[in-house]
Amino acid sequence: MKQIRPRLATAWLAGCSGCHMSFLDLDERLIDLAGLVDVCYTPIADIKEFPEHVDIALVEGAVANEDNLREIRLIRQRSRVLIAFGDCAVTGNVTALRNLFTVEDILNRAYRDADIVVGVPTANGGNGIIPRLLDRVRRIHDVVPVDYFLPGCPPSADNIFAFISDLLAGRAPGSEGRKFGS
Amino acid sequence: MSTIVNNRLIIQPVTRIEGHAKISIHLDDAGEVKSAQFHITEFRGFEKLVEGRPFAEMPGIMSRVCGICPVSHILASSKAGDMLLGVEIPPAAEKQRRLVNYAQVLQSHALSFFHLSSPDLLLGMDAPAEKRNIFGLLESDPEFLRRGIRLRQFGQRIIEIAGGKSVHPACSGPGGVHARFNIAQRDEILSWIPEALGSVAVALDRLKSLLDGFASEIAHMGNFPSMFLGTVTADGGLEFYDGKLRLVDETGNAVAENLDPREYFKYLGEAAEDYTFVKFPYYRPVGYPNGYYRVGPLARLNAAKFAGTERAGREMREFKQRGSSNGSGAVCESFHYHLARVIEMLFAVERIEELMHSPELYEDKIHANASLNRREGVGSCEAPRGTLFHHYWVDENGLITKADLLIATGQNNQAMNRTVDQAAREFLKRIPPGTQPDEGILNRIEAAIRCYDPCLSCSTHALGQMPLVVEWIAPDGEVVGRTSRASPSS
């Protein structure tokens, strides 16, 4: 019988996918990682709903719309350890630069200037498929409790690997001397 | 799993693509598809949030539009900055920019082909959902996957060498690049070339050997006539960093040639609709909506007359034989984006090797010094997913007063919606009325979108989280009904 491996999930909210690209920069260490953990949810696989009983969740991106809000709450509820993964999750970063403007200003700039304006998308979405934008972009820990912060734009693959290795070994990340904030 | 409720099927999120999206399909009472829409549900607002910031900051900020193709945004932004400075950059800087652009095409295409789409291609569209990913491939075909991982790593490593890190590198800015290139770096890159060529060859052979098994997918996942846009060299060859634009139609004939990318706004327009956050680019002389076109690997191989390197040249000639009218027309099946992508990887590796032997790459002068000389600048290049444009206006202090981005994935907006519609009509037809579609059917509809390798972080640059919805049309072009969103709130 297969040994029960810790369940690892990765998710993205409002960001650029760059932290996930850095995760993929683990390269052949991804193969090692697949032996150590059960990657039970990630945007690069086809499981559609964030599963229950996740041990470690890496969450990229800030909270910018109602879908993000719903998802981060679900992730928190279903994960033992939640990691704010990268600067958008940790500080809001570039995603939060839009907080200098109102949602209406941003929408007007993008759509009213188009050559042909058949319509201007509403911030409220429509038939329930398009999520409403939040007035302000939030950091993850503005919305739910976060266990660890892994900063960087993006965090390097070496830092990601060291961080996960520490957690799997039952150590506090960074206790072996690696600095994650540099 | 997604199910039909009240004549509506929603697949969410669409997985194994870069970013957030949903697909919605509306059925009539007989179970026939009325319309299908591809919704991008994210949006960040870059064109607004850069206002008031110095133009020299743009490569660093615009890089964050996309973590998959940051180099493309950095280069388009740098070129717009070059124009604001009014300079021609030194040859070493141009060569280095070309190098990182090829590296980025290579790593991004490797990600799309090996990590995201090869589970569909190798394991099959009907493979169990929990196995249909790179970890499933790890069990069934570890050596193939390892090659893909290392090919992507090669591209990322070149970017890291040139710019200090593989994602959001500091590799280029207005006026040139930031660090000289040296012989030790050359030697490391050259040491990868044989393996990279071998891996691309394996990918090409494998993909071609599989195509016969996907006849139905090839016929129904975005198979329709359209125009195709790409950057070409002065004599019409495949080009990624700097050139003229060429637009061809499905017959393979040029609709327009020698278009100056710095004047893109004169012949490319954008329409906004209230039911989607991604705008609809179109070719102005034809108008909206009929002036839509495709961009990216398939479009580039259709728009260019030849590749210009030995191996990719051979493959491209063979590729063009797949075109309509016995090879004289364009290749119109979006499924062949996959094949075009692998051929472009081959081209990129060949060009990277060539650049290593260019003496200019190692010259000391890497930056043109100038201050602000103009108030408007445009930069463009071929990003992995298609032609990319950055357009900035600045005040007398060089602060951005307005920024426009025209992004590759956005230009495929209409084509992607047509594709979802075509795939939904074909594959949902195969289930008895009143029953639910199985995983394989649903996956085929998503796989139709994966052909384009859409990057939703990019396409929704315009405003942060952009939900994009489109509904489309019957094969004969009739609009089969459009779901209106709520009217604008402002």
Image: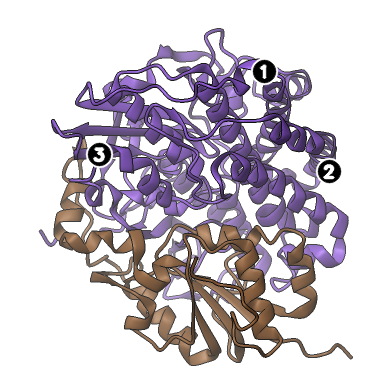
- Residue A69: x and y in percent read 36, 78
Q: Is residue B116 above or below residue B155?
A: below
Q: Give residue B403's mark.
A: 3
Split into 4 quadrants, where in the image is the N terminus of chain A?
A: bottom right
Q: Is residue B399 left or right of residue B175?
A: left
Chain corresponding to brown in the figure = A
Chain corresponding to purple in the figure = B
Between B268 and B251, the one nearer to me in the picture: B268
Task: Name the subunit of mark 3.
Answer: B
What's the CA distance linking mark 1 and mark 2?
33 Å
What colouring does the structure picture have? Answer: by chain
Dot 3 or dot 2, earlier in sequence: 2
Mark 3 Cα within 10 Å, few/some/many (few <14, many 20+)?
A: many
Residue at image location 48% in from the left, 38% down from the top: B72
Disc 1 secondary structure class: loop
- Residue B305: x and y in percent read 61, 14
Q: Is residue A62 above or below residue B16?
A: below
- For the residues beneath circles 1 and 2, the answer to whether they share a chain is yes
Depth-wise, is mark 1 or mark 3 nearer the camera? 1
Task: Name the subunit of mark 1.
Answer: B
Q: Give residue B468's mark.
A: none
Disc 3 secondary structure class: strand
Mark 2 Cα within 10 Å, few/some/many (few <14, many 20+)?
A: some
Disc 2 secondary structure class: helix
- Residue A168: x and y in percent read 69, 85
Type of the residue with mark 1: Ser
Between B254 and B45, the one nearer to me in the picture: B45
The residue that mark 2 highlights is: B206
- For the residues beneath circles 3 and 2, the answer to whether they share a chain is yes
The residue that mark 1 highlights is: B358
What's the CA distance linking mark 3 and mark 2?
43 Å
